[in-house]
Image (tube, grey):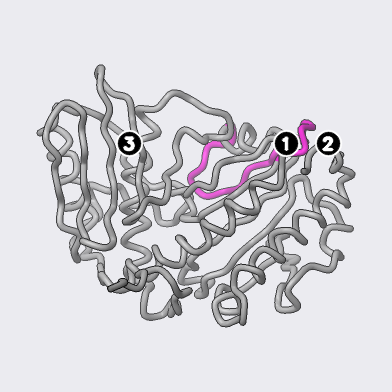
Amino acid sequence: MTTKSLTTEWPVLDFTAMQGTIETIHQWIQIIGKIRLKTMPWQNHSWHTTLYLSPVGYSTQAICFDGGIFEIELDFIHHQLHIKSSNAETQHIELKTMSVADFYKVLFEKLAALGIQIKIHGSPNEMEPAIPFASNTAISTYDPKAANLLWKAMLKSYGVFNKFRSGFIGKSSPVHLFWGAFDLAITRFSGRPAPLHQGGVPNMPLDVMQEAYSHEVSSAGFWPGSKDSPMPVYYAYAYPGNQAYAKQKVLPEQAFYSPEMGEFFLKYEDVQSSSDPEKTLMGFLQTTYEAAANTSNWDREALER
């Protein structure tokens, strides 16, 4: 007897129904990401701070601390947070509707029980308003089904992103989850320095932005949406941008360029509902990369295989 995989199909995402859960998880990963930020050695472009997809959710992966390692994982199958440590037993937190302040308090209590004493910057980044976690006592919604569907959508995207990454032999980021904006991203680099970034991201230090964009990039990712842009999308952009980039033809035909954002977008729905979602998404990733590389004169022969 065979069991059908829980992640075979690309799930339908209804942002309106999922909004509360998306906003709750965003707050949670901000807290967890800041723990990784505080404990991991620095890596270029803030890669030491990011989270990663796991077989059950999102993970910090292994973090070195006090002669051992620990890992924090959000599990969207069993709806628990796990803190695993090489020095002690695993601690668990039930994922449920609660305030951000309660989640913050319990998480650090569980860490302390494992002998892990960490102090983080206690307010979110890249969001407004940036209410301190300990003061955010409003009840935050957690719908297990919504959390699971969002993770499954990222899991499907993750597979295509990794296949796309394999065609590039220049410098490339891992496929990782940025907790600031809550996006799963993949970035390619030309190898050339870029103009100094001017910043402008809410509650994000200018020097962090300038280091992140120190070199020319072509970046793409998946973003679940927000109350101001209520739809899950794939995005792609180049830094520095140029006027020719915006005029390039990309796939599929539903993809569009936003002059306001300076990025190409493709609705998740257009990928999910297509006859071949993997091919559709790969076409978007490849053609937007080519738009960036060709209009910025990247040395594609040296960078691709």
Q: CA distance from mark 1 to mark 2?
A: 8 Å
Label 3 is placed on what type of residue?
Ile
Label 2 is placed on what type of residue?
Ala
Could you tell me if the residues under marks 1 and 2 are in contact, i.e. CB atoms within 8 Å? yes
Q: CA distance from mark 3 to mark 1?
A: 30 Å
The structure residue drawn at horizontal position 25% and vertical position 22%, both measured from the top left corner, is: 68
From the image, tell me which residue sits under label 1: 170
Q: Position of residue 220 (x, y in %)?
A: 64, 55
Mark 3 or 2: the one toward you = 2
From the image, tell me which residue sits under label 2: 302
- Quadrant assignment for the C terminus: top right
Residue 38 is a magenta residue:
no
- N-terminal label among 3 and 2: 3
Label 1 is placed on what type of residue?
Gly
Q: Position of residue 257 (x, y in %)?
A: 75, 68
Q: CA distance from mark 3 to mark 2?
A: 38 Å
- N-terminal label among 1 and 2: 1
Horizontal relation, residue 289 to residue 178: left or right: right
Q: Secondary structure at mark 1?
A: loop
Q: Position of residue 188 (x, y in %)?
A: 69, 43
What label does residue 35 carry, if any?
A: 3
Q: Which residues are magenta?
A: 189-207
